[in-house]
Amino acid sequence: MTCCIDVIDLSFAYPDGRQALHSLSLAIGHGEKVALVGPNGAGKSTLILLMTGLLRGEGRIRLFDEELVDGNVKALRSRVGLVFQDPDDQLFSPTVFEDVAFGPLYAGLSEDEVRRRAAAALARVGLEGYEERLSHHLSLGEKKRASIATVLSMAPDLLILDEPTAGLDPRTRRRLIEYMRSLPHTLVVATHDLRLVADVFERTVVLDGGIKVADGPTDVILGSSELLQRHGLE
Ligand SMILES: Nc1ncnc2c1ncn2[C@@H]1O[C@H](COP(=O)(O)OP(=O)(O)O)[C@@H](O)[C@H]1O
Ligand SMILES: [Mg+2]
């Protein structure tokens, strides 16, 4: 199995001295769907920011079989679709089209190709025809899906979503889960929504206190109520 992400002995402390990750190693193969679970403060978001080069820690990170270094961080990051927990960190244009078209336009694609990419990305998340809608007027569920479309339009090789179902009502959550299941991408999702984990991910990694405490098939991890309880996951 070739590696999509290979994190080797990664440690990170925030400037205030807070140690958020301790010597963490984790390899994720192409096409895998992996859930990162753990209580609040476990280090899930920090790990995501490190894996995408938005934070730099100690240790090594390989993306698509290349070592992540200052010189290639922009090029490698352009192949990763990172969706933040809060859609307001992702959507910053007046209209949905402008948000979804931003990446492809910035990448220098033709106007036709940008329109095609935007329409396809919106269709993929069930927002076909939303191009002229105002981003800040969308419901939270629509904003979450529009956020995913803004990265799908870049045709990323790897999708990383931080808490995609947080704050959604049950029906919207269910639809989003169906979209995630249908995505052909390598998918890494940080969440404490264990139903989402059971429905979408074949593999689950448990973090607690910045340490990887378990990593295995989702049915095994979710079947261990003692493990879940010990790490505040029930
Ligand atoms: N900007 C920051 N400055 C200092 N500490 C932070 C910052 N962001 C997160 N932390 C701390 O790092 C640890 C990991 O946080 P985080 O990665 O956000 O966890 P999770 O996403 O699993 O809830 C927590 O102890 C948190 O308080
Ligand atoms: Mg988080």
Image (cartoon, rainbow, N blue to C red):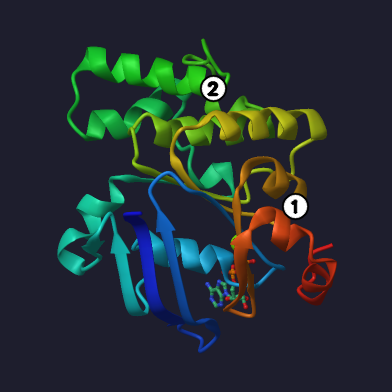
Q: Assess disc 2: are there few (<14), some (14-19) or many (≥20) residues with their C-alpha within 10 Å of its C-alpha.
A: some
Q: Nearer the viewer, residue 63 or 88?
A: 63
Image coordinates of residue 41 in percent, x first then y, are 65, 72
Where on the picture, by quarter, is residue 52? bottom left
Q: Which mark is residue 134?
A: 2
Residue drawn at x 28%, y 29% is: 104
| Residue 93, quarter of picture | top left
Residue at 25%, 65% in the rendered image: 68
Q: Which residue is mark 1?
A: 194
- Which residue, as the protein is rendered here, is positioned at the far bottom? 17
Estimate how packed mark 1 is, as few (under 14), some (14 to 19) or many (20 or more) residues with alpha carbons within 10 Å.
Answer: some
> Residue 196 placed where, x, y %?
70, 44
40 or 183, nearer to the observer: 183
Image quarter for ligand 1 equals bottom right
Tag nearer the camera, 2 or 1: 1
Task: Give the SS element for disc 1.
Answer: helix
Name the amino acid, label 1: Leu
Q: Is residue 205 visible?
A: no
Alpha-carbon span between mark 2 and mark 1: 32 Å
